[in-house]
Image: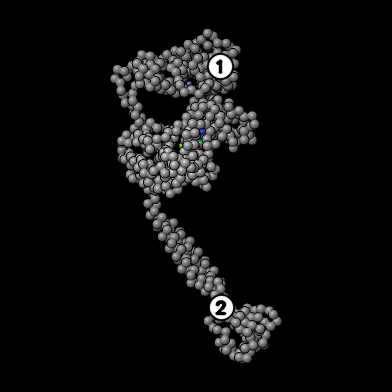
Amino acid sequence: MTDLIKKFLIFLIIFLVLAGLFSIYASPLEQSKESDISTLITLINEEKIESIQISGSRLELKLKDGSVQEIQKESNESLSSLLKNYDVPADKIEKVDISVKSESGLGFWVGTLLPFLIPFLLIAVFIYIMMKQVQGANSKAMMFGQSRAREITNQNLREKITFKDVAGVREAKEELSEVVEFLRNPKKFISLGAKIPKGVLLVGPPGTGKTLLARAVSGEAGVPFFNISGSEFVEMFVGVGASRVRDLFRRAKKSAPCIIFIDELDAVGRQRGAGLGGSNDEREQTLNQILVELDGFDVNTNIIVMASTNRPDVLDAALLRPGRFDRRVILDMPDINDRESILLVHAKNKPLIKDMNLRTIAARTPGFTGADLANLLNEAAILAARRNKTKIELNDVLESIEKVMLGPERKSHILSEKEKKVTAYHEAGHALVAHTLPHADPVHKVSIISRGRAAGYTLKLPLTDKYLHTKAEFVDDLAVLLAGYATEKEIFGDTSTGASNDLKEATRLARKLIMEYGMADKLPPRTFGEKEELIFLGREITEQRDYSEKVAENIDQEIGHFILNAIKTAQTVIKKMRPNLEEIVRLLLEKETLEKEEFEAIFAAKGTPA
Ligand code: ADP
Ligand code: MG
Ligand code: ZN
C-alpha cells in the first residue's frame, strides 16, 4: 500500500510541475499588450503596412519596407472591431491587405486543447495505473497455477548450444539426432507412417550433461525449448502442480514444434502410493496430469517431451510405458577419452599454455563428471589468476584436481610435532600398503597437509576406468583403508581419532560386500535386505529385513571378520617393509608432500622385500 501512496505522490508532483510550466507558457497567449496594439494603429495610420495575416490572436504584419512584425491581439476580439474601436479611418484599412489564415494548424489545436486535456490525461493515466496495481495483486494469486517454465528460443539464447558443445556421450547423441531430424522435418517421417517417440528420458548420474544435451537438441533443431524442473511442480497446495502442467503444455502447443524439458523428473514422477502424507497427493495429481497430457497430444503435434533423471528406478512404471517416456537415452560417466574431449570443450575459452597436455589431466580424473571437469578448469583459472599468470599451466590444473576432490588445502592448520608424526605414519601406512598390495590402486600423491577435514591424505587413482570390481580388489581396498589405523597401532601401540573416517568407510565397504555383492566367506552368495526409499521426509532409506535374526548375527560377525583380516594384512605389510615405511615418513616430515615419482623412487632405492 505504501507503494501506492508513493506512486500517487509522484504523480501529484509531476502534475503540479506540468501545470506550473504550462501556465508560464500559456499566459502570454492570452494577454495582448497595449503597446502592440498602438503600434499597429500607428502603422496603419502611417500607411506603412502592406498586408496583415491573422491567425488566431497572432497578427503577422508585412511592412512596405519588406520587414515583418508580429503582434498579439486579444483572442476574443476581431481585428475589424478592434480597429473600429480605435477609430482608424476606413480608407486606411482598405489599403491594407488583410487575410485570415484558418487556424487548423497543429499548433493551434495543441495550443487550445492542451490546457484542457492535460489534467484529464494525467487523471486517466493515474487511474489506469491504480487499476493495474489492483489487478496485479489479484492476478498474482491467479498466476499460481501457471507454469513457470522458462522458454528459451533461439533469439534469447545468448549462444546457441549444439551437439558440438557436448563432448563424449556418443551413443546418446546418435540416438537424439533422430529426434532432431524429426523436429526439423516431421513430414518425412509421418508420410512413411513412422511413429516418433513423444517422450525421451535422459538417464545418467548428476553432472553428466543431461540438461546440456537437452538444450543441445533444441539448438540443433532450432526450435523453442521449454525448461521446467520437476521440483517446481510440487507446491504447497494440491492442484497447483497439475494446473502448471496443463498450462505448460498449452503454451508449448502454441509454439510447436518445440521441446518441453522436465528436469529432474523423479521429483514428481516417483512411484505412486509409495509415501505418506498430504504432499504426495499433490505429487500424484501432478504425475497424473503429466500422463494425461502425454497421451493427449498426438504424434503430429510436433512436440517432444524430454525429461531427465538420475534415478530411473524410482520412476512410476506408467511413465515408462510405450507412448510415454519410452525412449531412454543413457549418459554414462565419461571415460578417459570422453574426459579429454570434455576438457577440450571447456578449454576453448580459457588461455592454456601451448603444450598443455589435456590427456594427462583426463588420466588423473577418473570418476569426474562433465560438471566436475568444467569446475576443475574454472578452479585452475582462478588459481592461475591468483598467481598472476596470463596462461593456465598444467600444475595449476593438477593442483585444482585435489581441491575439487578433497576440498581446499589448509596450510594454516598447524599440527604439533607429535600430531605431525602420527599423521605422517598414518598416511605413509596407507601409501605403503596401497603400493604393495597387487589389486589396490597405485598411489599418486601422499601429503600431510590438511585438506578439508582430513589431517593428511593419500591420493590413489586407478590406472584405467573401472566398471567391474572383484572381490580381491575390495579386500585389498579394505586393507589400504585400514592401513593408517594399523600403522598407528604398530608404531605407537595406540590409535588416534584420525582413523575414524577410515573405519567408517571400511565398515560401509565391508557391509556392502556382504549384503549387496554376495562376497561373504561364510554366507551363501545372496543379497541381504531389501532397500526401499520412502519419499516421506525426503530421501529416507529404509531397509526391509528379508533374513532371520540369526543371519543378522552372522552378517555382523562376517563384517568384523573382513575388517580384522584387512588390518592383519596391513600389519603384515608394514612389518615386512618397515624400512620403506620409515623412509616415507622421513621424507613426508621433510617435504610434507610426495608426488608419485618421489614416492616410487623410495621403492627403487630400498627394494621390495619378498
Ligand atoms: P546434469 O543435468 O546431468 O546434472 P548438466 O547438463 O547440468 O548435468 O551439466 C552441468 C555442466 O557440466 C554443463 O553445463 C557443462 O558445462 C558440463 N558438462 C557436463 N557434461 C558435459 C559434456 N559431456 N560435455 C561438455 N560439458 C559438459
Ligand atoms: Mg540437470
Ligand atoms: Zn587414513
Question: Considering the numbered disc 1 on the image, is that residue within a helix, a strand or a loop?
Answer: helix
**Rendered location of residue 344, percent (x, y):** 57, 32
Q: Distance between the residues labelled 1 and 2?
A: 107 Å
| Callout 2 amino acid | Ser
For marks 1 and 2 on the same chain, the one whose residue lies earlier in the sequence: 2
Question: Which of the numbered marks, if any, corresponds to residue 607?
Answer: none
Mark 1 surroundings: few (<14), some (14-19) or many (≥20) residues within 10 A: many
| Callout 1 amino acid | Ile
Q: Nearer the viewer, residue 217 or 179?
A: 179
Return the residue at label 2: 102
Residue 203 visible? The answer is yes
Return the residue at label 1: 584
Corner quadrant of residue 202: top left
Residue 266 visible? The answer is no
Question: Considering the numbered disc 2 on the image, is that residue within a helix, a strand or a loop?
Answer: loop
**Rendered location of residue 525, percent (x, y):** 36, 17
Q: Which residue lies furthest to the top in this view?
A: 610
Numbered disc in front, either 1 or 2: 2
Q: Residue furthest front?
A: 192
Q: In this view, does 158 lie above or below 17?
A: above
